[in-house]
C-alpha cells in the first residue's frame, strides 16, 4: 500500500471515529491543561528576572542572526510535542521573527484590533468582535473556521488578553480562551451550537504568550501558541501525529505572516497620510 492511499485510509477512518462519537472535555484533561498553563506562565515570569533572557532567541548566540538573515523560526517548544495528557493532547509551538522599521506600538495596534481579526486572519478567523476592556484586560470574540478534513465545524470562542509593559523597549502579552463552543455541521441547514466542552474535541482550549522587544531598528517578536485537543486514537497515532505537527507548524507560520502583512499595511497607510 503506497503512502498516499494509506494516508487517505487513515483520514477516512479518523473522520469516522471523530464524527461518529461525540466527546466531552474530562476533568482530568482540564486539570492537566491548567497545570501545563501554570508552568508556561511561571516560565514567562522567570524571563522577567534581572539575570534571565527575556527572549528565547537570546538564549543561544546564533539565533538572532538566523532570524534576521533567514526569516522566522517555528518549532515545537519541546521534542515531545504534542504532549500526551489524560484523554488529550497539548500542542505548544514557538514562532520568532524580526519586524524591521516598526515600533512595539505598531504591533500592539494590530494585535489589539480585534474587530479586524476577521480580515487580518481570514480564512482561519471568519468573524471577530471586540467586547470590552476592563483594566489591563481585553475581552474579544472570534469564530474560527475548521478547515480540517475530519469534520465540518466552526468554533465560537470568547477570549481575554492582557498586554503588560515591562519597560520602554519590552512588552509581553497573555491570551486565553474563556469559552469555546463548537458549531456542528457548520454552514448547513442542520447547523447547531453545542454546549461548551462538547463536540469533536479538535480544539478544547487555546492560549498564547507573546514577547516583544524593540531594538536593532525594529521589533523582535515571539509567539508561543498553546492548544488542547482530544487525543488521537491509538490505532492512528503513529501516522496522524506527523500530520498534526505539520498543521500546527503551518498554522503558526500563517498567523505570523498575516500579522506582518497587517503591520506593513498599517505602516504604508501612515506614510500615505503624511504625504
Image (cartoon, grey):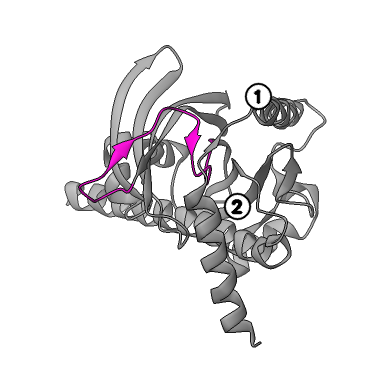
- Residue 113: in magenta span: no
Q: Which dot, 2 or 1, sits closer to the camera?
A: 1
- Nearest the viewer among 73 and 243 is 243
Residue in front for this viewpoint, 89 or 15: 15
Q: Is residue 167 left or right of residue 195?
A: right
Report which quarter residue 33 is drawn in: top right
Identified at 47% across, 51% down, the residue is: 19
Q: Quadrant of the N terminus?
A: bottom right
Q: Nearer the viewer, residue 245 or 68?
A: 245
The residue that appears at 56% across and 46% down in the rendered structure is 221
Which residues, given as a range, are shown in magenta? 185-205
For the residue labelled by badge 2, is the local secondary structure a helix, a strand or a loop? strand
Q: Would you name the residue on which mark 2 appears?
A: 95
Q: Residue 203 colored magenta?
A: yes
Residue located at (64% from left, 49% from top): 94
Residue at point 19% right, 53% down? 272
- Asked if residue 133 lies left or right of residue 176, the reply is left
Q: Which x, y percent locates residue 275?
A: 17, 52
Amino acid at each position: 500500500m503506497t503512502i498516499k492511499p494509506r494516508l487517505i485510509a487513515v483520514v477516512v477512518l479518523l473522520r469516522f471515529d471523530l464524527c461518529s462519537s461525540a466527546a466531552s472535555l474530562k476533568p482530568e484533561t482540564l486539570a492537566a491543561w491548567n497545570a501545563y498553563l501554570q508552568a508556561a506562565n511561571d516560565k514567562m515570569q522567570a524571563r522577567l528576572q534581572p539575570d534571565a533572557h527575556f527572549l528565547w532567541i537570546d538564549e543561544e548566540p546564533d539565533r538572532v542572526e538566523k532570524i534576521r538573515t533567514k526569516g522566522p523560526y517555528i518549532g515545537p517548544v519541546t521534542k515531545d510535542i504534542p504532549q500526551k495528557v489524560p484523554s488529550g493532547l497539548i500542542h505548544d509551538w514557538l514562532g520568532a521573527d524580526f519586524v524591521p522599521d516598526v515600533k512595539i506600538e505598531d504591533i500592539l495596534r494590530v494585535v489589539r484590533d480585534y474587530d479586524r481579526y476577521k480580515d487580518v486572519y481570514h480564512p482561519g478567523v471568519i468573524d471577530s468582535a471586540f467586547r470590552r476592556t476592563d483594566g489591563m484586560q481585553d475581552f474579544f470574540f472570534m469564530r474560527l473556521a475548521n478547515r480540517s478534513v475530519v469534520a465540518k465545524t466552526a468554533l465560537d470562542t470568547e477570549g481575554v488578553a492582557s498586554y503588560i509593559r515591562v519597560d520602554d523597549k519590552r512588552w509581553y502579552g497573555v491570551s486565553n480562551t474563556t469559552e469555546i463552543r463548537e458549531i456542528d455541521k457548520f454552514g448547513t441547514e442542520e447547523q447547531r451550537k453545542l454546549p461548551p466542552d462538547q463536540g469533536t474535541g479538535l480544539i478544547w482550549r487555546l492560549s498564547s504568550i507573546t514577547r516583544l522587544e524593540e531594538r536593532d531598528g525594529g521589533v523582535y517578536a515571539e509567539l508561543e501558541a498553546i492548544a488542547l485537543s482530544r487525543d488521537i486514537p491509538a490505532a492512528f497515532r503513529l501516522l496522524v501525529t506527523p500530520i498534526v505537527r505539520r498543521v500546527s507548524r503551518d498554522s503558526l507560520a500563517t498567523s505570523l505572516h498575516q500579522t506582518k502583512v497587517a503591520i506593513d499595511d498599517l505602516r504604508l497607510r501612515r506614510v500615505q497620510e503624511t504625504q
